[in-house]
Amino acid sequence: MSNTESLNPFAIAQRQFDEAAELLGLEASARALLREPMREFVVTIPVRMDNGTTRMFKGYRVQYNSSRGPTKGGLRWHPDETIDTVRALAAWMTWKTAVVDLPLGGGKGGVTCNPKEMSEGEKERLARGYIRAVGRILKITKDVPAPDVYTTPQIMAWMMDEYETLIGEAHPGVITGKPIELGGSQGRGDATARGGIFVVREACDILGIDPSTARSSIQGFGNAGQYAALLGAELLGLKVVAVSDSRSAIYNEDGFDPKALVDHKLRTGAVSGFPGSKSIEPDALLELPVEVLFPSALENAITSRNADKIQAKIICELANGPTTPDADAVLYKRGIYVIPDFLANAGGVTVSYFEQVQNSYNYYWDIGEVYEQLDRKMTQSFLAVHELHEGRKVNMRTAAYMISIDRVAIACRLRGWF
Ligand code: NAD
């Protein structure tokens, strides 16, 4: 990594924005508004722990921009969560809802905590405490959270229950990613990866790659990574030769049985020890000779330190912020086709939006309807970004930014914000 390369996610989000704003010739007042969050909440949440003590947790909710509609974005529970991570993720949510043209703004939230060290009871009390602290700024017409790293449908259910208890009426649409039995949408569970697989299908078509003979590697094996393995195989015949989680990475050049691997991860809590696999260095996973690489963990996986060693032909960023701007420049020069995060992983928020719509009219779609609408949204959005990337000779990320920033700027201008 170069000494000067910043890994602060919000500094990176602003740098990406600045580059696209320059190409768009955006006026100074528009840049000043759109490179900063419009509203931020930071709270301290007291939680009674199982051992009888009370611990204080820092919680965050950032409403980045609401010009196109209520803000929308997940809640991350992670020990490294900071206000700058949340700001960056909220900015990317703004560009994400815009690139797939949903009538929503962008927001994000989180809590600095380690859920792996907390009991179910402690997690429930933290979920309810978070809603007591920030519930006043949430509403289906204001701001709607969803799951992200280390948050689950069960956590969404506790949060919805706390919200409804506070206001005394049914409001399932205040949060998405809920269990189906509580108003969740069919297809939300695997929507992020499914949307990613749809755009990989399109990219393979453009690049002349036959996915049924292609290999993939997956960094991060949670919701996004596991479903990428399952759906890549099911929908495209894609082989998975390497996967990793926060502790280790494994490899099998003949490819894994994705279903058995997911079962192993769910049963043992780790990818390591999967029969027939060889253990490799987590960093080496990113540099394997594969057709498709799915970064599906956290930020800053691909930096100036390893960008020149990546051998994948397509990088489908299911994670948010996995590639730094310095790495982007190297990848673009080397002809590696990057499907940028806020386009590649927009399937999650798209089906979250479908969930909100179904909650609002209290009538639920069947799974086929969800898949069809998701495919249409992802494919159309992808093709528009690809076309601009070719037309303006910019990388896919900058093309996606240009489309999104333009849409958000139009909404702000119409409102008279600049
Ligand atoms: P998750 O909590 O279900 O899984 C996270 C996985 O990443 C776990 O397997 C964990 O072990 C692994 N991990 C953590 N640190 C790692 C590291 N350093 N190296 C390798 N693996 C590591 O989370 P998720 O929902 O799958 O989210 C993953 C990424 O996808 C995040 O960047 C998230 O913001 C993004 N994303 C998720 C959704 C969604 O709907 N869940 C939507 C859009 C984007």
Image (cartoon, rainbow, N blue to C red):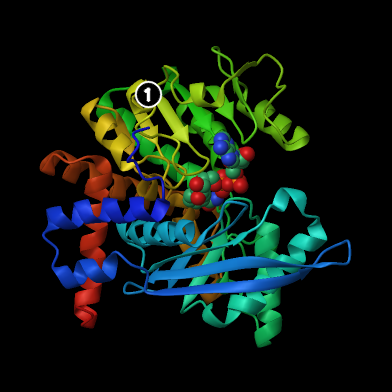
State the residue position of label 1.
Answer: 310
Residue 135 at least partly seen: yes
Please report the residue visible at 43 percent of the width from the left and 21 percent of the height from the top. Answer: 287
Does the image show residue 368?
no
Note whether 202 is above or below 43 in the view shown.
above
Horizontal side of residue 37 vs 194, given as left or right: left
Q: Quadrant of residue 379?
A: top left
User: In the displayed structure, does residue 2 sit left or right of residue 126?
Assistant: left
Q: Where is residue 163 drawn, in percent x and y? A: 65, 78
Answer few, some or many: residues within 10 Å of disc 1's Cα (few below 14, many 20 plus, some between 14 and 19).
many
Q: Looking at the image, which residue sits at the far bottom?
A: 168
Q: Amino acid at mark 1?
A: Ile
Per the image, label 1 sits on a secondary structure element best described as: loop
394 relative to 190 in the view: left or right: left
How far across and how far down the image is residue 182, in percent? 68, 66
Give the camera-side residue of 54 and 75: 54
* Image: 373 above or below 230: below
